[in-house]
Amino acid sequence: MAYISKRNRKKEKDKQTAANNRRELIAAGFKRRDLLKMGLLTSAGMLIPKKGLSAHPLNTRGSFDDDQPNSPPTTPFQELMPRLPVLAPVASLTPAPTAAPNTAAGEARTVAHQAFAQFPPQRFYEMSQQAGLVNMALPNELPAQTIWGFNGITPGPLIVERYGNLGSPQNGSVLLRLRNNLPANNGGFGLPSVTTHLHNGHTPLESDGFPCFFMERGQFYDHHYPNVYAGINSTHPGTGDIKEAMHSLWYHDHRIDHTAENTYKGLAGTYILFNEFDTGNENTGFRLPSFGDGQNPLTSFDIYMVFNDKVFDNQTGLLKFDLFNTDGILGDKFLVNGKINPVLHVSPRRYRFRWLNTGPSRFYQLFVLGPNNSTKSFWQISTDGNLLERPVQVNSSRFSVAERVDVIVDFTNDAGKTFFLENRLEQQDGRGPTGDVLGAGQGDKILKIVVDGPVVPDNSVNPATIPAGTYFYGFPNTNDAPRITRTFRFERGNGQWQVNGRLVGGCEDAPRFRIKRNTVEKWVFQNNSGGWQHPIHMHFEEFQTLSVNGNPPSSTGLITRGRKDVFRLEHNMETTVYFRFRDFVGRIPLHCHNVVHEDHAMMVLGQIDDVGDNRTQP
Amino acid sequence: MTDLKRRSLVAALGAAPLAVPLLTHAQELGLNNKFKQISSRERIRQRYFPNLVLTDQNGRKLKFYDDLVKDKIVIFNMFYAQCEGICTPITRNLVRLQKVLGDRVGKDIFMYSFTLKPKEDTPAALKHYAHMHKVKPGWLFLTGSPDDMETLRRKLGYVDPDPEVDKDRSNHIGVLKYGNEPLERWGGCPGMQSPDWIAKTLSWVDWPKDMAKAKGNGGAK
């Protein structure tokens, strides 16, 4: 008998088992296509194992890589989960920021700041996109990785800012200067040409990080973030609508056609906005767990967690990006704040966790797994950084790429216990999750949480004791008549993404839709595919969901009621959402935030101006 | 129009070894027993560019990596001559693209159309197709053994994860992939985008000025 390696024997056996299973199912009356539709069969013809997520990365052949199926092994739960470093403001910038683009000094911006005089920047930040060398696993398990990060780290520094008080909104205004100091040499993937989106700030659009407003190496770009509530120059002059407050944001590369590789390479970071209600201090306002200095475990109980999944080359141990994949890329290593499967030590008290999924293509449904496969409930307080009406007790939260979920987890009575954040949403390829949620302990344990910290005071609100009714801001009304209802149908043709049957145009094409400033629009998102799911993202404004497949959005289980900027457009789904476009004008994209789909033209470029158009199917 | 047309050609061919990973730390820790020190450019070659022997419309035998990809800016698409759907409009669009790119096509920029039906697309059929569309030099129509063409299709990501959809060849025709091999910059775009815009997207993987040495006529053999 020919020599068969151990791995091949195992593979052969798996194939046999799969074939047997398939025959059984086919005998039971299922067609291959049914199984695919049900997500029970992979394209390679393997039955999807019911145990574990089996997160083998798909290669460009749409099948498991025959020679090197997996990242090299790493031992989970060895290293501490980093707390994200807070970016310090600088006293001044040289050259001084100007309203008009400072082209002579090397600024890449082409549009003048539209709200510079109204909201003069009060604080200044400066960062550069640059290469850095980081360890994502123990240094004896994987080599140090060359990443591209803001200030050379990934995730980038955490920016902590505050809205101005309602009487003095200009106090929130900041200016961030970004310098492109990336090398020409990319080490295998990445384009050293960048634009940075503040997701999802109510930001004048020349500062928003429009995909076509990119800068080259050696250039800089000034982003003016007034940090004002929507409505400031329209429905709620001088103050903005407090119900439009946003608290958990993030910034990331948005380079047209090259966002997936650039964010995968590390160009993403987080941004928090506090105000006089969500104060960062558990003794004031809504009394949410204190942020402290963001570092000291004895005083900092508000923790941003950035999730992403990656693949490492089995031969070199280095980060690997599937260059020719157009479907979506899955990793088999799960990182939190830049480390593979880290550990977080907490005290027996309440914590606010801010969960963000930076992709590239995976959807998560996180559970808090306790001893003996128990599932610990927690409180979801926001969707995409926007507070709900009140905390909602849930067993899990689902979030696709770019979505944020703020939760309160109460470890008060858990001293000595160990928990895991577990992703139980089954996903086999970049097209989206199968829809199956695995059983407790059957998913991927991403983060270990050990409740062995010292007992510390907890003055944060206990969500279980909040009386009935609205606790946070409540939602804006959705009663104003829309100026127009537009439909966006997302589909695939000739292996290429299309919206309403058309390909994305280039940056220089006329806008596909023109929104009239300070009007309301209803948008219908349609996905006619049973095979693909898409996190659909609109910049600049949050929407409210009016209906999903003709039904009112549910407020139980998966939260769909809140203000959001990403809609998870699942299989064969149609949804209607409500937008108010206020205050600022400029170029704006609507796109899929599966960044691989996004880079393959799943995007429509439009603009907000004072004219608008009447295209109902842009 | 874009830089690509105007700029005198500059190239960084044979530039300093690109992207040698930093392994000094790794060596201290004994990681070099576990991992190989292979440049990212070499790993890309190993993963995506098998050195298969292909035949162009003039009957020339060419090695995929050595002769067609190495040291070049390349544009890939998939097609077949008898395709009645989207192939013809895309080919026409690429003819316009070739005009926009001008005399750089065939010097340091090369266009490659790979057949999805190698059994019927003989070199003679490809030559007829190229002639019919008034294709100029520097744009090759390539065929090979069915197995090799299938390998190439999969390596270059012209696949659909749903095997039923994958069987329909028209699902592999809409996308252009492009890149600069020594620079390790790769991307994709719809084949029906305007030729000016495609040329613009190609300029993003063009030789950067600060890496470049004037090379006259680029990396063409």
Image: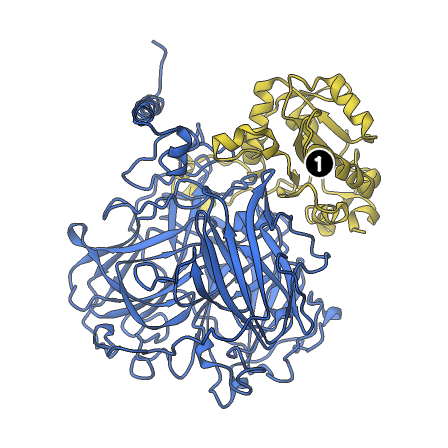
Chain colours: A blue, B yellow
Count the marks. Answer: 1
Residue A176 on image: x %, y %: 57, 72
Amino acid at pointer 1: Lys
- In depth, the one of B117 and A611 nearer the eye is A611
Q: Is residue A401 visible?
A: no
* Residue B205 x, y percent position in the rendering: 68, 46
In the picture of the structure, the residue carrying the numbered disc 1 is B72
Task: Please tell me which residue lies in front, B79 or B182.
Answer: B79
Identify the residue shown where x is 57% and y is 72%.
A203
Q: Is residue A580 above or below residue A327?
A: below
From the viewer's side, name the closer residue of B97 and B40.
B97
Q: Chain of mark 1?
A: B
The residue depicted at 71 percent of the width and 36 percent of the height is B72
- Image quarter where the N terminus of chain A lies is top left
Mark 1 residue element:
loop
The image quadrant where one finds the C terminus of chain A is: bottom right
Q: Is residue B18 left or right of residue B34?
A: right
The residue at 28%/38% (across/down) is A50
Residue sitting at the far top: A1
Spot occupied by residue B80 in the image (x, y as percentages of width and height): 68, 26
Q: Neighbour class for label 1 at 10 Å: few (<14), some, many (≥20)?
A: many
Residue A380 placed where, x, y %? 31, 66
